[in-house]
Amino acid sequence: MSISSYKVDLNVRLALNVEEDQNYDFMIDRLSWIRSLWFPWKASDPMYRLPAQLSLVSFFLGVILGVAGILLGVFPIYSGY
């Protein structure tokens, strides 16, 4: 068993109910790919949260506008223009 030190922010400390300068034993598991995408969305650090939120919003806007572009491009072909 190895001893490691992890630094966590206030929100994580409050959620885990731990205090500073105390020793605790934790088991760390790998996140699923869905949870790994959701984690940055709710991160407390804005330098980590903001780019993740902007990238997800831009992805969904790109998908919506891409589908709209395809539909608008196909519509004149089938309408007889």
Image (spheres, rainbow, N blue to C red):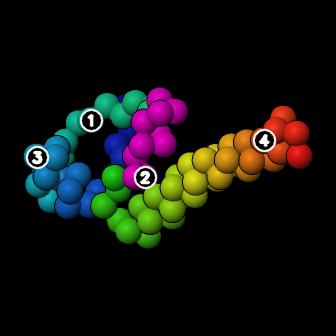
- What is the three-letter code of the residue carrying label 2? Pro
The residue lying at 48 percent from left, 42 percent from top is: 37
Q: What residue sits right under mark 2 in the picture?
A: 40
Q: Secondary structure at mark 2?
A: helix
Q: Which mark is residue 75?
A: 4
Query: Which is nearer the N-term, disc 2 or disc 1?
Result: 1
Front residue of this view, candidates 81 and 33: 81
Q: Which three-letter amino acid code belongs to the residue tagged 3?
A: Asn
Question: What is the secondary structure assignment of the residue under circle 3?
Answer: loop
What x and y, as percent, mark residue 33?
A: 52, 33
For marks 2 and 1, give the one nearer the viewer: 2
Q: Position of residue 47 (x, y in %)?
A: 44, 70
Task: Give the extent of the magenta segment.
Answer: 32-41
Mark 1 lies on residue: 26
* Three-letter amino acid code of the residue under disc 4: Phe
Q: Is residue 36 magenta?
A: yes
Magenta stretch: helix, strand or loop mostly = helix
User: How many residues crowd mark 1 within 10 Å: few (<14), some (14–19), many (20+)?
Assistant: few
Secondary structure type for disc 4: helix
Residues under numbered marks 4 and 3 in contact, where contact means CB atoms less than 8 Å apart: no
Magenta segment: does it hold 19?
Answer: no
Q: Does 25 appear above or below 10? A: above
Whether residue 24 sits left or right of residue 56 in the image: it is left
